[in-house]
Amino acid sequence: MNAMRPLRTPAELVEADLVAPEQIAGIEAVAERYAVAISPAMAALIDPKNPNDPIARQFVPDAAELTTTPEERDDPIGDLAHSPVEGIVHRYPDRVLLKAVHVCPVYCRFCFRREMVGPQGLGTLSTEAMDKAFAYIAAHPEIWEVILTGGDPLVLSPRRLAEIMQRLSAIEHVKIVRFHTRVPVVEPERIDEALIAALKASGKTAYVALHANHPRELTPEARAACARLVDSGIVMISQSVLLRGVNDDPDTLAALMRAFVENRIKPYYLHHPDLAPGTSHFRLSIEEGRALVATLRGRISGLCQPTYILDIPGGHGKAVIGPDALRENGGCHTVSDFRGGEHAYPPSE
């Protein structure tokens, strides 16, 4: 029975052999605070005999989530500081986030919006709030791109998605619509003709940013779902989070980026983990992250290189924090190659 529906309760996790019975008290305490859901596709990937399974680490609750460190905060990237109306985040001049829904098909244990999503979160925008959100977009001609996020926008029905897209089609200055989602990986069966038609209903250029963190997530079913999107003319890019115990080694990170490119998904952002409550066990230091990203240079194709970024706490936006290959040296420059060798530029005679 569990193979046909998401796992949502500690008892179901014990029944599925994903949590030991003696751990249930701690897991129940986590579930009281943070949403829990593991889709059948992700549950099927977990090896219950492997205590370090990277899929389990992303989705199975851990008592470590009850530990909050002083630097963590409920709104780690400062969405609320840039929300002029409910459902809109306008942090950058030419684009806005439209958070139509705060529900996901799975709940990542490291989620930076974990205080906002889930059954006890902010829910779905009301009709009145949605009207105000579209009125804001229409009143700001500098908005070139609308990014649907949340929550996962692809949990909405094709009818609801088509309604949103049709309303965007009437706003001439919006040229790009982007969807941030895990659905092609965690519920690939949802990517059908009706949903794809809804994503394209505005007539605008559509992008889908796929969130995946480990190459095992790109199952044959997920790859087929991505192919349906790309074959329809939708451009796909990737988003991943650098996570301790999931993808914090060069081989896994390289395999993930190659898997994206093999499936016609351009690697886009590799996020340093945000300071969300109860997530310190996932975080690497920035120095560790920079060293890992540096190993990708020369190791894998330029097509596979993501941009390593940090969302500055407090709502100040993203900063590129990848390794520096260039430094000034007495009026010239020293450039590092992918093997760690250093060279003067311009070259000395």
Image: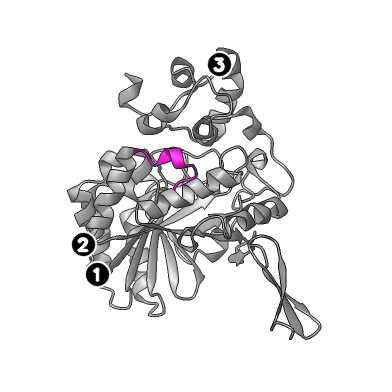
| Residue 180 percent location from the top left of the image | 40, 54
Q: Residue at x 60, y 18 (%)?
A: 23
Disc on the earlier residue, 1 or 2 = 1
Give the alpha-carbon distance from disc 3 to disc 1, as whole Å: 50 Å
Residue closest to the far top: 21
For disc 2, the neighbor class at 10 Å (few under 14, some 14 to 19, many from 20) is some
Give the alpha-carbon distance from disc 1 to disc 2, as whole Å: 8 Å
Mark 3 — residue?
Answer: 20
Q: Residue at x 36, y 62 (%)?
A: 178
Left or right of residue 231: residue 13: right
Of tags 1 and 2, the one toward the viewer is: 2
Q: Residue at x 68, y 67 (%)?
A: 324
Closer to us: 329 or 183: 329
Label 1–label 2 contact, CB within 8 A: yes
For disc 3, the neighbor class at 10 Å (few under 14, some 14 to 19, many from 20) is some
Residue closest to the far right: 330
Give the alpha-carbon distance from disc 2 to disc 3, as whole Å: 46 Å
> Is the C terminus in the top left, top right, bottom left or bottom right quadrant?
bottom right
Q: Which numbered disc covers residue 169?
A: 1
Quadrant assignment, res 307: bottom right
Disc on the earlier residue, 2 or 3 = 3
Asked if residue 226 is positioned above or below residue 135 in the image, the reply reads above
Q: Is residue 99 magenta?
A: no
- Looking at the rendered structure, the kind of residue marked 3 is Ala
Mark 2 — residue?
Answer: 201
Closer to us: 168 or 21: 21
**What span is in magenta?**
210-219
> Is the N terminus in the top left, top right, bottom left or bottom right quadrant?
top left
Asked if residue 261 is positioned above or below residue 32 in the image, the reply reads below
| Residue 201 percent location from the top left of the image | 21, 62
Label 3–label 1 contact, CB within 8 A: no
